[in-house]
Amino acid sequence: MNSTVVTGISELTTNDEELGTLTGAALVFEGERVAWVGAAERAPQADHRVDLGGRAVLPGWVDSHTHLVFAGDRTAEFAARMAGEPYRAGGIAETVRATRAADDERLAANLRAHVAEAAAQGTTSLETKTGYGLTVEDELRAARIASIEAEEVTYLGAHLVPPDRDADDYLDLVCGPMLDTVAPYVSWCDVFCERGAFDAERSRRVLLAARERGLGLRVHGNQLEPGPGVALAVELGAASVDHCTHLTAEDVDALAGSDTVATLLPACDLSTRQPLPPARELLDAGAKVALATNCNPGSSYTSSMAFCVATAVLQLRMTVSEAVYAATRAGARALGRDRGEGALGVLRPGARADVHALDAPAASWLAYRPGVPLTHRVWKAGRRVDR
Ligand code: NIG
């Protein structure tokens, strides 16, 4: 099998409990997997050698929350928001209209372009969702297209009740024929549990139906105001509850006492002019915290995990190590991909060779030089994806 030794690593963030962060390190990958990690002077021979000349290396970003099967943009809505209009999730309906009107090739090309844009910035795995179709045919189309381009696919038929539908009829569809139709293409089910979208009882029904079909659970919760999303996610053992912008002390305690990952989406909070999530309280209480972009044309149109990391450090008061871990291994955990052979978000023998070399001597530069493009080279499963 083809092997590559990467040397000249000034600082290697492995995210492995035993290996920790190494200085003067080297890394070997063989085929798709990491084969060896250690001190540069003990590095074994390999077929190819890459000298990074004193750059920092970390696992590729794991972006565990995006909505990338869409058409159109919402530039005017964004401009109005920056001029003082509040964010209304009702804008989702505009993207639904544009998405339904686009043909398959246009949707697939848009998704591919965003995945490539993210890869060029160090994202080596990405989850994406349906949710801008909201008919059986359009949700199926979104799930099928997403399953070709994205690492993990989530069914979000319960994003919004389409304006022309009765809420109970639509819920029956989401929990019945729509779920049955998309299930072969997805591994997760999500629900937007928020006032104006799906209340706790309706959200529970969607999630229980999905669990019955063998799907993993995720929840959009507590985005625009305090609400039942976090409690529901913890009650049902969801892998992750995403947004977590408006949390009560009970929500923080519930997350700290559970395995549910709190996935924070700070770029969304900035773009919708919401408060920032209580990352410090969550971490100090012992909750598992991930960071993701929530890339979508309405509430958070960025694919930059580096921006999320810089924001988390500078504004959420996370340390650089906490933020990098949250954007890599904790994201992998939120997707159930952080352990075993081929694990994501970690650099140790057996893990997938998803490697992000920075044009910087240390990972702290992600926050020290915010807004500066610092990606030098990216390998996904041992293959370069940054060009
Ligand atoms: O995560 N909250 C619901 N869904 C998306 C919003 C999508 C949109 O506004 O188009 C979110 O922010």
Image (tube, grey):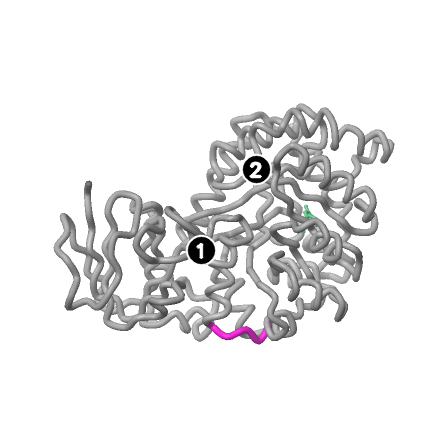
Q: Are marks 1 and 2 in contact (CB under 8 Å)?
A: no
Instruction: Tell me which segment is drawn in magenta.
Output: 316-320
Q: Earlier in the sequence, mark 1 or mark 2?
A: 1
The residue type indicated by label 1 comes to Trp
- Callout 1: SS: strand
Q: Residue at x 28, y 73 (%)?
A: 23
| Disc sitting over residue 61 in the figure | 1
> In the image, 203: left or right of 29?
right
Based on the displayed image, in which of its 4 quarters is residue 182 positioned?
A: top right
| x and y, in percent, of residue 5 in the image | 20, 55
Instruction: Please tell me which residue lies in front, 220 or 123.
Output: 220
Q: Residue at x 52, y 41 (%)?
A: 152
| Disc sitting over residue 187 in the figure | 2
> In the image, 156: left or right of 14?
right
Distance of mark 1 from mark 2, alpha carbons? 20 Å
Q: Residues within 10 Å of mark 1 (few under 14, many from 20)?
A: many
- Callout 2: SS: loop
Based on the displayed image, in which of its 4 quarters is residue 13 positioned?
A: bottom left
> In the image, 30: left or right of 292?
left
| Magenta portion: prevailing SS class | loop
Q: Residues within 10 Å of mark 2 (few under 14, many from 20)?
A: some
The CB of the residue at mark 2 lies under 8 Å from ligand 1: no
Q: Relative to 256, say whether 263 is above or below.
A: above
Q: Relative to 52, say whether 47 is above or below.
A: above
